[in-house]
Image (cartoon, rainbow, N blue to C red):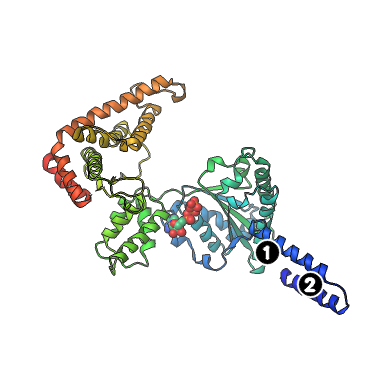
Amino acid sequence: MIKEISLGLALAVIIFSIVAGYNILPLVILALAGGVLYFIAQSRGLVKSFESSDKPNTKVNFEHIGGQKTAIKELKEALDFIRNYKEITLLGIRPLKGILLTGPPGTGKTLLAKAAANYTDAVFLATSGSEFVEMYAGVGAQRVRKLFKTAREKASKLGKNNAIIFVDEVETLGAKRGQNSSHMEYDQTLNELLVQMDGLKADESVRILVIAATNRADMLDPALMRPGRFDRQVKVELPDRQGRLEILKIHVRNKPLADDVDLNNLAKETFGFSGAHLESLANEAAIFAMRENCKQIHYRHFHEAVDKVIMGEKLNRRPSSEELHRVAVHETGHALICELLRPGAVSTLTVTPRGGALGYMRQHNEEEMYLYTKDYLENQIAVMLAGAMAEEQIIGNRSTGSANDFEKAFKTAENIIKTGLSDIGIVSWDNLSQDRKFKEVKKILEQQEKRVEGYIKQHIEEINNTVTLLLEQEKLTGDEFRKIINKKVA
Ligand code: ATP
């Protein structure tokens, strides 16, 4: 509106000046220079517009978010303060100013914020902490002011009483003050956010709620978490098995599934997947089906998609036949110990290079465990070491392919010591000397090496049979692998 009036005025002045016989050339040059400056400022992001989603995102509601029952319940509870504004003012309750969503990437924090806007019939403005980071002093603070102003203006324009400002990656903007090298600028921006939040009043014509999301709540300045600012924290965790099933159901709604697709089983196979992973999984499975000219998506497409989401696209790079044999032996070693220690655990065994790996063994993970026993951790170490041990026993030497396995095995051994589960009992990790740490880690690893060596020696024939079939087929399902192993076990 202001833009239109200014343009009209400018045009009127120009016409009047020409009619009155004034030289308007300096005026035109001045206007041009102003335009160029505005254009540069905009392209450098000094004049920022924020993503508003009055139309498309109103479609997102809490039914589109799976596996986050607790987060949704907590969030809704907070949002009900906004919906029932009149009732809460009667009781003298101060509505919330900020809600902080914390949790790993891709778990649905942005979706929750969009659904919150829909639930409260609010204008929704989305931005990211990184958009406030500029080398120019004061620009970030100016943007914060503009963000709140835009929210108020938009809501008034649309006749709404509520506006939700969503700030993703808030740790970039709200990290502990005094930590950044160009800290003055960061601090100014954060201060401005605090000032704006402090200035939010319940009786304004447009009530603003700030929803921020972060994967690093530990990095946030304590001033942000103080009551009266982000005084409600909602944890958005990775979904459990039931949650994964719900999310899968949401993302296959618009896809034709064949009868062999068992979503329950798929939920079991996708331990550790976030909502974003599951969305990508459903999409990739549909792409695989399309590549095969199938009218429906079959379970094998989903199975292939799981590998792709975990490991990345198949690589054209083919290792030499000698290397391929080594990879097959290595992966079979992992699979053998995994199966012996936890029967039924192996899900897939393959020598197809994907992402950074030449092959891999995927196991069904045990469902959501919060505590681990010493046996469990030692078994994990055994599985990690088994690749290298199989190479040594079958081929006669080891390769560099086990570096990653060893890294994980070290970490797990350290965890055993730190948690007081090792032979040296309860210790303070920080007070242990490097030498002592080294000796204890080595002891744990050597014990498992011995154990794995014993298992491998007893199963040389099965390993060789598996390797032959694996090289022939490139991929074995857990059941195919178990058929070979169980002959001996039976
Ligand atoms: P980040 O922390 O990386 O910003 P985020 O937690 O904000 O991630 P979203 O952007 O909300 O994650 O999710 C990305 C996509 O993943 C969504 O558009 C949706 O398709 C899917 N998704 C994530 N979580 C869920 C969920 N709980 N239910 C359904 N879909 C989900």
Foreground of the two, 286 or 81: 286
Q: Taking 80 as reference, is 430 left or right?
A: left
Query: How many circles with numbers are drawn on the protein?
Result: 2
* Residue under the image location 56 percent in, 40 percent down: 219
Foreground of the two, 306 or 201: 306
Foreground of the two, 194 or 412: 412
Mark 2, Cα crowd under 10 Å, few <14 / some 14-19 / many 20+, is few
Location of mark 2 (residue): 10
Give the residue type at disc 1: Glu
- Residue 73 showing in the rendered view: no
Foreground of the two, 411 or 64: 411
Find residue 127 and report its horizontal and vertical position in percent: 58, 56
Quadrant position of the C terminus in the picture: top left
Question: Which of the 4 image quarters holds residue 37?
Answer: bottom right
Secondary structure at numbered mark 2: helix
Q: Taking 61 as reference, is 6 left or right?
A: right
Give the residue type at disc 2: Ala
* Residue under the image location 24 percent in, 44 percent down: 324
* Residue under the image location 77 percent in, 66 percent down: 31
Find residue 141 and report its horizontal and vertical position in percent: 68, 50
What is the number of the mark on residue 153? Answer: 1
Disc nearer the start of the sequence (1/2) = 2
Between marks 1 and 2 in the image, the one whose residue lies nearer the viewer: 2
Alpha-carbon distance for marks 1 and 2?
24 Å
Secondary structure at numbered mark 1: helix
Taking the view exactly as shown, the residue that stands out farthest to the bottom is 19
Quadrant position of the N terminus in the picture: bottom right
Question: Which of the 4 image quarters holds residue 291?
Answer: bottom left
